[in-house]
Image (spheres, rainbow, N blue to C red):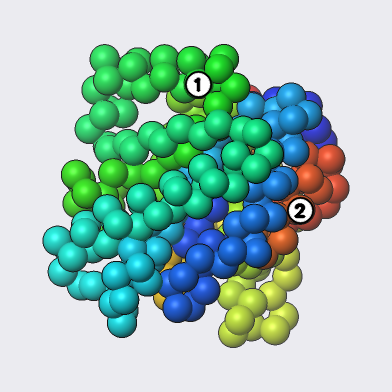
């Protein structure tokens, strides 16, 4: 598939279940490999923006909580602790490859306001010009919308919005399964992977299920919704298994991996 072959500016979204173990602690080996691949892609001339979930899960582990809190204030506190830890790890690992990182925490009201939105776009532009890798998340300590299920949607829709704002050439979502299937592969052994989606319709939406892990809040439905948003702007999107960050290479080289949603323009 050639959809990503000439992509230069790429948004990569990584989910909580890809970054962490069931304990909530960081999967260090996977994070290290992800950072190595992204750094290598940046070395090749790609402009990378990373939309990273995981702050609440990491905060839960860091604080020694037994499970993800149900109380919103406690989740905000876990996000505050976890975001600090997450950015420390990213900064530490990217620095090993001589890359600078920047943190951008967004809320829905920022991107909905034309002036604030323009400021965000200008920041992205300056960061790319300076050779920095933006790392984006929703600001859970300020906005409770995502925690209440009313905002970007576990960063899936946020990643599509970022891709649109920065006029990206492609969006790659690292998930905990291989891509979009005709049915839930965990409950239906006859489910088949869908390698290419040219058009998103009601039948395709019916293929989506809930979250696979218990650590994230998104699922295949939010990923398809993200694909609807981004492909409408002519930007292709791929869903691949994040257990192997080398899948990023495969997508960009045009190999048949995961599910590719073709841009509509």
Residue visible at 48% across and 15% down in the picture: 126
Q: Nearer the viewer, residue 244 or 161?
A: 244
In-image side of 99 versus 81 (left or right): right
Q: Please identify the quarter of the rendering in which residue 198 is found.
A: top right
| Quadrant showing the C terminus | top right
Q: Does residue 39 sit above or below 90 in this rendering?
A: above
Q: Secondary structure at mark 1?
A: helix
Assess disc 1: are there few (<14), some (14-19) or many (≥20) residues with their C-alpha within 10 Å of its C-alpha: some
Say which label, 2 or 1, has the lower sequence index: 1
Q: Is residue 121 above or below residue 112?
A: above
Question: Going 64% across and 47% down the picture, which residue do you hit?
Answer: 35
Q: Nearer the viewer, mark 2 or mark 1?
A: 1
Task: Name the secondary structure under disc 2.
Answer: loop
Q: Position of residue 123 (x, y in %)?
A: 41, 19
Q: Which residue is mark 1?
A: 127
Q: Quadrant of the N terminus?
A: top right
Q: Position of residue 80 (x, y in %)?
A: 27, 53
Query: Image height check: is 200 above or below 163?
Result: below
Q: Is residue 24 visible?
A: yes
Query: Residue at (44%, 53%) from the top-left corner?
Result: 86
Label at residue 79: none
**Crowdedness near tag 2: few (<14), some (14–19) or many (≥20) residues, C-alpha within 10 Å:** some
Question: Horizontal placement of 139 versus 58: left or right?
Answer: left
Residue to which mark 2 is pinned: 246
Image point (60%, 39%), residue name = 95
Q: Position of residue 43 (x, y in %)?
A: 74, 30
Report which quarter residue 79 is drawn in: bottom left
Q: Quadrant of residue 10?
A: top right
């Amino acid at each position: 598939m050639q959809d990503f072959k000439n992509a230069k500016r790429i948004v990569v979204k990584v989910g909580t279940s890809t970054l962490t173990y069931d304990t909530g602690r960081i999967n260090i080996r996977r994070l290290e490999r992800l950072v190595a691949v992204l750094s290598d892609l940046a070395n090749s001339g790609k402009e990378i923006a990373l939309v990273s979930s995981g702050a609440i899960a990491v905060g839960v582990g860091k604080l020694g909580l037994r499970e993800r809190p149900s109380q919103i204030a406690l989740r905000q506190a876990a996000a505050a602790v976890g975001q600090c830890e997450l950015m420390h790890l990213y900064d530490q690992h990217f620095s090993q490859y001589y890359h600078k990182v920047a943190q951008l925490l967004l809320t829905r009201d920022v991107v909905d306001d034309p002036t604030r939105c323009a400021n965000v776009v200008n920041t992205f532009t300056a960061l790319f010009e300076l050779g920095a890798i933006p790392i984006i998340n929703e600001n859970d300590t300020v906005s409770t919308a995502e925690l209440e299920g009313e905002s970007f949607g576990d960063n899936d829709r946020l990643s599509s919005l970022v891709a649109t704002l920065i006029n990206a050439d492609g969006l790659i979502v690292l998930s905990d399964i291989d891509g979009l299937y005709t049915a839930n592969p965990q409950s239906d052994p006859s489910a088949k992977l869908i390698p290419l989606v040219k058009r998103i319709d009601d039948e395709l939406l019916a293929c989506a299920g809930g979250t696979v892990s218990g650590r994230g809040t998104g699922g295949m439905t939010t990923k398809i919704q993200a694909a609807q948003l981004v492909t409408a702007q002519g930007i292709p999107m791929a869903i691949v298994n994040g257990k192997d960050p080398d899948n990023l290479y495969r997508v960009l080289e045009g190999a048949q991996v995961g599910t590719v949603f073709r841009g509509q323009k």
